[in-house]
Amino acid sequence: MRIQEIAEKAGVSTATVSRVFSHHPNIRAEVREHVLAVARRYGYRPRLSSKQRNIVIITPYKQIYPAQAFVEMVMTELTRELSRHGYRVEILPHDNLERLESIQFCGAVSIGFAPPALEVWDERFAVPLVMVDRRPEEKMPPGVSYVHSDETQAMELAIGHLAECGCRKIGSIIHGVESLGNAEIRRQGIVRALKIRRLPADRGLMKIALPEMFLEETGKLLHEGIDGLFCCGGDNIGGSVAYALSLYGKNIPRDILLVSSERAQISRFCIPPQTTISPDYPALAKAVAATLTARLRGDADVNRETVIPYKLIMRDSTVRR
């Protein structure tokens, strides 16, 4: 089906249909919705213009997404990588999504959070959307792609490293809320990694907590007799847990080996510098840019989900001297 046929069936001009598909801001909302509804009814997918090079990066505002350091690192790499591909970037907070109706863009990237408006993306916008740090969900439209880090592999990296360093009773503190999102995925990954090595995997050795509980949960793990500690998530969980250990009179790494989540400008300056797991931010950004470019070209075999391995950064917190 051609764009002229869509225009005829929608009762509008070809120019109007073209403006709808290029997301021109001077099209009334009801006209846009009508044209897109006709296109969906006949299974029409527009060929996106290669001349339009604006990419919107949708970011979570801090109140709803505590891991702000992750967002900032992803943003830094994304803006650099998208620029290399010739895209122009506009940054838009989640609480200002209504602006999408008044700007022209050829694709969008959303980091870490999926507000209800994104669940009907295909109905509102004829451009690709890539979700970063999210896994595919049934309720999300088929036109949405996903790029995220491999949380299970990250847990394997951390637990495996502590085990190789001689730890035989490893405790974990996971930033988050019980049974929700990444916290539960990480807990399951830790259990799996411990069981593979035939190390204790009691639920009491894995604490899912928010920062105000880190001190108390650290004390509980020390009471269990741990010799290794893995803490992940949050903006500075490694620094917070290291401070808690010092309050209990424990020395890193003499008494406890520690692995945490990498935080730029923090982890390597701790005393001692902390061994960490880190998302591969450049690889995440490259995967996002490649996915957007393939979707804009109209490639038929674009992966809906791309999973990027974590990296282990070795420092002194796991080296006994």
Image: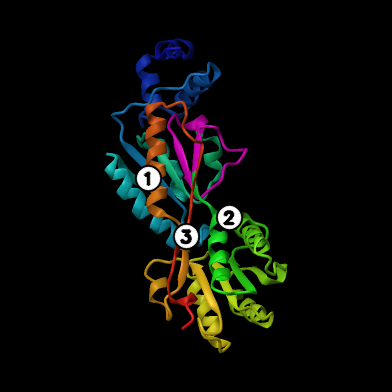
In the picture of the structure, the residue carrying the numbered disc 2 is 152
- Between the C-alphas of marks 3 and 1, the distance is 25 Å
| Most common SS among magenta residues | loop
Name the amino acid, label 1.
Answer: Lys
- Residue 137 located within the stretch drawn in magenta: yes
| x and y percentages locating residue 212 in the rendered image | 58, 74
Task: Name the image quarter holding residue 18.
Answer: top left
Residue at the disc numbered 1: 286
In what element is the residue under mark 1?
Answer: helix
Q: Is residue 290 above or below residue 72?
A: above
Q: Do the numbered discs 3 and 2 sit on residues whose CB atoms are within 8 Å? A: no
Q: Residue at x 28, y 44 (%)?
A: 83
Q: CA distance from mark 3 to mark 2?
A: 26 Å
In this rendering, would 311 be left or right of 134? left
Q: Is residue 311 above or below residue 143?
A: below
x and y percent of residue 230 in the render? Answer: 56, 70
At label 2, the amino acid type is Thr
Residue that appears at 49% across and 75% down? 318
Please report the residue visible at 56 percent of the width from the left and 80 percent of the height from the top. Answer: 256
